[in-house]
Structure formats: structure tokens, C-alpha cells
Amino acid sequence: MYLRFANRLFWETDKRLLWKLVWNFGLKGIRSVQRHKARLARGEFFPPFLYISVINSCNLRCQGCWVDVAAKQARIEPTAMSRLIGEAKAMGNSFFGILGGEPFMHPEILEILGSHRDCYFQVFTNGHFITDEVARKLREFGNVTPLVSVEGNEIVSDERRGREGVLSRTMEGLQNCLRHKVMTGVCTSLCQTNFDLLSEKWLDRLIEMGVMYTWFHIYRPVGPDAKPELALTPQQQLECRKFVVEMRAKKPIVIIDAYYDGEGRALCPAATGFTHHISPWGDIEPCPIIQFAKESIYDERPLREVFRQSAFLRDFRETAAQHTRGCIVLERPDLLEQLVVRHGARDTTARHAAGSELDAMEIRPSQYNPGQEIPEKSLAYRVAKYFFFNDYGTYGKHFDAAKWIDTRDNPPPKRELMQIGSTE
């Protein structure tokens, strides 16, 4: 498998873009993680990776979307992005995940990406705005990997994305990237209607097309129209984990996951401090689906002080790590409510309904399933996760498995609606 993948990298990629990936993301990324570990040892904090939603607007209306895509457009301007990226680079960061809405609807997105060629950007996109000219510019920059979302066949895609003809436009954007030899990935938010994409046939098709990596997200029922009926069962989540581990040791394509360490133990990237999220309004949130904040990138303090001094973010990491190795939003929304009230965190949505949505959430299983851990079979992934992506001792300091088991067997009672601060 390793030789086959090396052969793909040699023959199917632009070598300049491959070097950009190795240097800007790989070597610099490892350095950023090592600096993160050193900061933690000193009792300091700054996440080694940041995910930034540069715009809220989108041309699609996906099921379960938590972003206010139909609200008045908000976006982070190039000057604010340059300041944000510059301050993060000063802390050793070089990788940034770019989200939306649809990032390529940002009128200055190419200016932003092209102005920081010493960084590496992963852009989460539906592909509809990646024209041949845009793909050509991405190859010129060399520091961008589009992660194109494919949600199933034509019928499923239209249903999941809320529009007609979605898949054909997505595949057109994907093909534009591949034709220009841009390092490109494909992601899928796995739910009840597209679980069949979890197959060797689908991976073989991606490999044949020239896709270099893929990412199977697990659908999380949150937001104003959560669609909980689409959520996977614990058994399906376990099947997904088994599939990923098996295929990583078999197929010449990188398969990403963000919720397990090398031993198969669940983790939350936000709880470990691996990453936090910036909203289109500049709010600094624990992660994209937790739309509450106390701080902003527009605060007068330097960003390093904002992260180091944030009692809200610190309390989130400690609370989450103490009660579950999975997703606190799904497993313990009551604790998240308490956290928000305790700090007077504001609702960062345009709809100002995140508090009531959180209160209405039912407890659901996440990736944490003790006793069902599936360790990596691939030595390369084991090594990479050990050095690059683990819990940094977070759960050893805080986690109490007995509390989690008690909560699982005796879920907390239904909460009454709490008055949670808003941006108004």
C-alpha cells in the first residue's frame, strides 16, 4: 500500500505543490504541535491549528446546517485575516482550515489565500465556485487543498444539500482541481441516507479520479433544523471506524479522521486544545457547532493573550475533558448550557436562537464507546498520531470514566430553558 501511494504521489501530483504540502503543512505543522506541547507544559495555551469560517453565505441549504447562510452576509475582510494569520504564525502556526458558508463565495478569498504562501490552507467547499480559472490560481499558489463535499448520488445529494443538480456542479469543480493537479480531497458527512458511500468501491473511484485523501465526517444533529433522524447509530459509528482502520492499511489514499488517537481511543480536538474556531463575525468559539463566545479576533488584546486569558475556553476544555472523551454537545448539552451561563457567553448566531436550540437537544451518542476501541493497523498512522495528533494528556488530568458511565446509564433530566446571553 505504501509503495502504491508513493507511486501515486510521484506520477499524479505537481511536485512543487507536493513540496508545499510537505513543508508548509507537514514539517511546519509538526513544529506547531511541538510548540503547543511546550506551551501546555508551561501552563500557557494557543491552539496549533485554527479553523476559520470566512463567510456565512452559501448557495446551498443543507439538512442540519448550523450556519446562518440566509442571514445578512458577514465575512472576515483581508486585513483582519492578515492580522489573524500573522499573529498565529508568530506562535508557530502554519495550517488553517477555511470554512463557511461556502468559502469561495468570499469575494477576496483568492487574495487571502495567495497573500500567505508560507502557510497551508484546507478549504471546505461544495466545489460549485471552483471554475477552471480558480483551479488554475490554486495551482499557482501551491498552498491550498480543496476538500470537496460529496454527499451521495444525484438524488441523495439534492436532498441533503437542498437544491437540484448539486452533484454535477460539485463534480465539475472537483474535476477542475484534479485537472490542474491541485492536491484535492473529498469529504462526506455520513448519515442515514448516504451511509452506503462507506465502501471500497467509492474509495477505488476516488483513487481512479486522482483524489489524494478523503474524510468521513459523522453527521451531528445540531442547529435550527437538526434532523436527528439522520444521525448514525452507535453500531454504524463503530462500522465507520472499522472501515477507516481497514482501508488505511489497504488503499493508496489518505483517510483522515479527527476523533480518535492511534489506539482507537476517542477524543475531541477542541477539548484537547488542538483547534478552536473563528466565526464569520470574528467570534472565537470552541468549535464550529458550539456557537457561543466571550472573545473576538477584534479584541484590542493580541491574539496570544486572548487565547491565554480566556476563562471561557479554558473552562470548556476542562469541563469537556472531565466528562467525556467524545462530543460534549451530543452527550452532555446540559453541561454546555451551564458553561455558557456561568461565563455569560454570548450567542454568536445571527438568528439568536442557539440557547433554545441547545436546551431542546436530546442526549445522543458520539464517538466515545469504551470497550470498543479499534487501534490503527497502519504503522504510518500510528506514528503520525503519536507525534502529531493525540490527547496531550488532557484526559489523564481530568477525565473520570465513572462519571461518564453514570451519565450514560442515568441521563440527566430534561433541562428547563436557560436565558443565555446573545449578541443583541
Image (tube, rainbow, N blue to C red):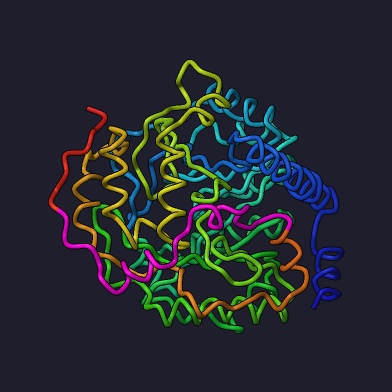
Expressed as whole percent of the image width and height from the top left, the position of residue 218 reads 45, 67
Expressed as whole percent of the image width and height from the top left, the position of residue 179 reads 70, 59
Q: Outermost residue toward the left?
A: 416
Task: Magenta stretch: give its range.
Answer: 387-415
Expressed as whole percent of the image width and height from the top left, the position of residue 75 reads 43, 32
Placement of the C terminus among the 4 image quadrants: top left
Q: Residue at x 36, y 77 (%)?
A: 192
In the image, is 363 to the left or to the right of 111? Answer: left
Expressed as whole percent of the image width and height from the top left, the position of residue 173 reads 57, 56
Quadrant in the picture for residue 71: top left
In the image, is 84 to the left or to the right of 228? Answer: right
Q: Image height check: is 163 above or below 311?
A: below
Quadrant in the picture for residue 386: bottom right
Placement of the N terminus among the 4 image quadrants: bottom right
- Counting every numbered tag in the picture gives 0
Q: Nearer the viewer, residue 318 or 360?
A: 318
Q: Nearer the viewer, residue 130 or 65?
A: 65
Q: Residue at x 62, y 44 (%)?
A: 134
